[in-house]
Amino acid sequence: MFRILQAKFLAANIFLMDIEAPRIAKHCLPGQFVIVRSHADGERIPLTICDYDREKGSVTIVVQIIGAGTLRMSKLTTGEFIEDIVGPLGKPSELTETPIEDLKNKKIVFVAGGLGTAPVYPQAKWLSEHGIKADVIIGAKNKDLVILEEEMSAVSNLYITTDDGSYGRSGMVTVCLKDLVEKEGHSYDLCVCIGPMIMMKFVCVLTKELNIPTIVSMNPVMVDGTGMCGGCRIKVGDAIKYACVDGPEFDGHLVDFDLAMRRSAMYRSFEGEKLNEEKEHECRIGGAK
């Protein structure tokens, strides 16, 4: 059992948890993930580590409610316990394995879409701790869905854009990135893009045109998280890779996003059914009181 040190909602369907897990906190690095099981009969959910505190012995996860398992997890509060948390898993960000002096000579931009802000944050924070402030673009549908703004502002040069123009700049993240390069004189040696697959696909189309090497995180397709189920199998160039054990980060210009999105779609209807079942169960329990 692992104690929840803090639990709070960041947006309507997005919540954050700080979990006491000293061994994971001691060894994890930006880019890695954990597998969380909130209840004894719950599903195993791969979640990217949003932050960690080695002294306090805690790791932070940010979760979006998309299925029955994440809905049940969202009901847990500060001081309660989750059943299991396993990690760190996956390979760390390649930034953590690059000599710092080399990184200081690079201009890096992160593009985060929605929940992708959470896994971008530890990488931007890690760079900041080593004296490097990268540009970060956060994209959301509207102002209410922008998360971790204060935290990200402290560690990066932050640009926020919303689809409806209700906050920050107006338009998609691709519009913001293109404007920064073509209208505002920014140049980048590397782009790290994390978010919905359709967003990552079109960011990669743009960065290929702009000749910016791009890394993407394929954590959205992970299911089991150990390489055993094959659910996160993707095509990268001519090779078949597994997001959980070979990644989750890959060269975005080589990823076959159309294939990955078709594979991901296979699980959406199942998750939706389980979410509806859980909500109906809650209604029945509530009505019986």
Image (tube, helix red, strand yellow):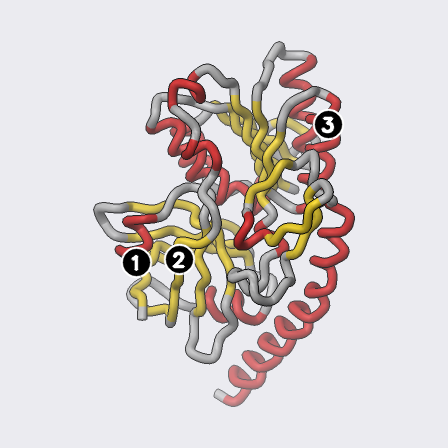
The CA distance from mark 2 to mark 3 is: 34 Å
| Residue shown at the point (72%, 26%) measured from the top left | 208
Give how far across and how far down residue 80 sits, in percent.
32, 69
Label 2 vs 3, first from the N-terminus: 2
Q: Amino acid at mark 1?
A: Ala
Considering the image in quadrants, where does the N terminus appear? bottom left
> How many other residues sit within 10 Å of disc 1, few (<14), some (14-19) or many (≥20)?
many
Name the disc covering residue 87, or none. 2
| Residue shown at the point (44%, 19%) measured from the top left | 102
Local secondary structure at mark 3: helix
Q: Choose top left, top right, bottom left or bottom right for residue 154.
A: top left
Report the residue marked by disc 1.
Answer: 21
Residue 69 at least partly seen: yes
Give how far across and how far down residue 256 sits, in percent.
74, 44
Name the disc covering residue 81, or none. none
Give how far across and how far down residue 160 sits, in percent.
57, 30
